[in-house]
Amino acid sequence: MCNPITRSDDDRARQSGGSERTDTADADVDVADAPPPPDPGGLPVLGNVHELASDALGFYERRSAEYGGIVRYDVFGTESYLVTDPGAIGRILVEDHDRFVKGEMPREQLGGLLGDGLFLAEGEAWREQRTAIRSAFFRERVAAYGDSMVEHAREAVDSWGDGAVVDVHAASTEYAFAVLAESLLGSDIEGERETVRAAAEAITDRFDMSRPTSFLPEWLPTPANRRYRRRLGALRATIRDLVTERRAAGPPADPSAADDLLGTLVAAAKLGALDDEELVDNAVTFLFAGHETSALGLTYALYCLARRPAFQDRIRSEIAPLHGDPTPADLRECPALTAAVDEALRLYPPVHSFFREPTEPIALGEYRIPSGVVLTLAPWSVHRDGRWWNAPETYRPERWLRETEDGGVVHGDDRSGPAVGEHPEHAFFPFGGGPRHCIGMRFARQELRLAVATILRRVRLEPVTEELSLQASANTRPDGPVHVRILTRDEPSDPESLDQDEPSKTSW
């Protein structure tokens, strides 16, 4: 962790919805007596597909603002409920997590991509896989990846010339792939970059919510679906070849002794904890979970900081006393750096939606939710809700910081702040929550902070792309390049021209 907090990421993920519960998450309401949530309706057959295709992120925000924390919508007849109340989200992810599963919709949509890997597995199969894999994400193992994260960030920034205009989305994608290739899947995957790129492009097209066909089953022979199946098949074949090579080299007897995630998976399969298909499924899962979302998180952090030169300077002052580039241990003393990354994840969460399905009828607050429906938990809407955040659409990393009695500064997680206490905990959940929170959360948080710190030690960032255009696909992606200008000269920032939103004091 890069802030001096007293609880670990895993501890926070297991916490309930914070000290402030909301009315729409009352577990004592009788299910039989509770009314259904609001149902604004939609078109025959299509339901709300046309609204989602027009602007999915805006649809979530509008429906939540107009109808509250739980509201119905429909997708080609599939009964769905948008959930944006933090208390209800805490119940679903944490308190009553055993009453919810990922459900049929994610499996129908993502089964061809992720198979029976950790993301979609349920019950005992999920527990066995998580136990087999978790050693790759222990704190000590993640810290050992720090050198690779810094080295690849240094190589990237050293290739940028003074005054160059860089597409930070493209650069962040290259960076995240290089880190993943070395740290988690072994350098073997580096030679298959084009196969991975082609598959990632096909996945983005397949799940682009601006296309109504993205809501249809994968087996329908649309051009996007055919391309998706072909490129995904090539990727899975590549991973099977890598597994064969690892087995020929002799995996360790104990998964915890492996050097990377692929070695952990191969060793776990040898012990019978995974079968061969689950091994490949998990390799694909982590390739995209660890590659796409980290790249997007770094993209948004750099874009936001380019527009806040004074906060760039604050981070530089924070890391200036370090001896060289930062290490994972150094990050504990970097609350401003942590705040910069967390605020980017709040404003632009790479995962815009999580999905669950209740296994039995359940009352969420005043409403009755039937079993077997799709629950859409939307970080995009919750993170931008004015009930929980002041100036929610403004990038203000100061909101995460607190002054101590001795005049120091800590990240808000160290005491009452937006992630706990004053605001419900699940007003911020970019990595999900509860037992099924993202297993790679610690890896991703470390990667983003080390990359930002390494870059800002060397260059200043100025905005070129003024407004982001986003598309809701499998993740929240920029709909085009995200350009910033690189300045390697040591010249002062100009807060008057570029940082006019700089608050004079902490603003919530």
Image (spheres, rainbow, N blue to C red):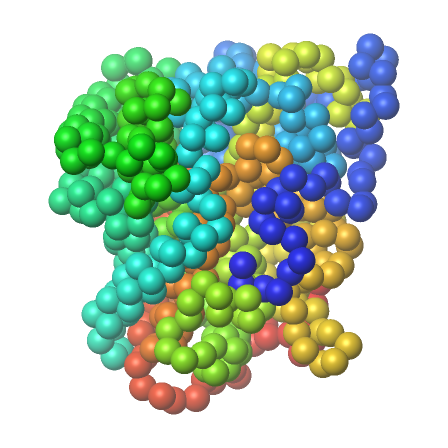
Residue 340 image position (x, y, % from top left): 53, 64
Q: How many marks?
A: 0
State the residue at coordinates (80%, 40%). 21
Nearer the observer, 457 or 35: 457
Q: Quadrant of the C terminus?
A: bottom right
- Is 233 placed above or below 505 here? above
- The answer to whether one can see residue 69 in this image is no
Residue 488 image position (x, y, % from top left): 30, 81
State the residue at coordinates (50%, 39%). 438
State the residue at coordinates (36%, 88%). 490
Q: Is residue 385 left or right of residue 492?
A: right
Nearer the observer, 23 or 213: 23
Q: Is residue 431 left or right of residue 268?
A: right
Q: Tell which residue pokes out farthest to the bottom in this image.
A: 491
State the residue at coordinates (47%, 24%). 128
- Is 231 placed above or below 61 here? above
- The answer to whether one can see residue 486 in this image is yes
Q: Quadrant of the N terminus?
A: bottom right
Residue 330 image position (x, y, % from top left): 49, 70
Residue 318 image position (x, y, % from top left): 52, 78
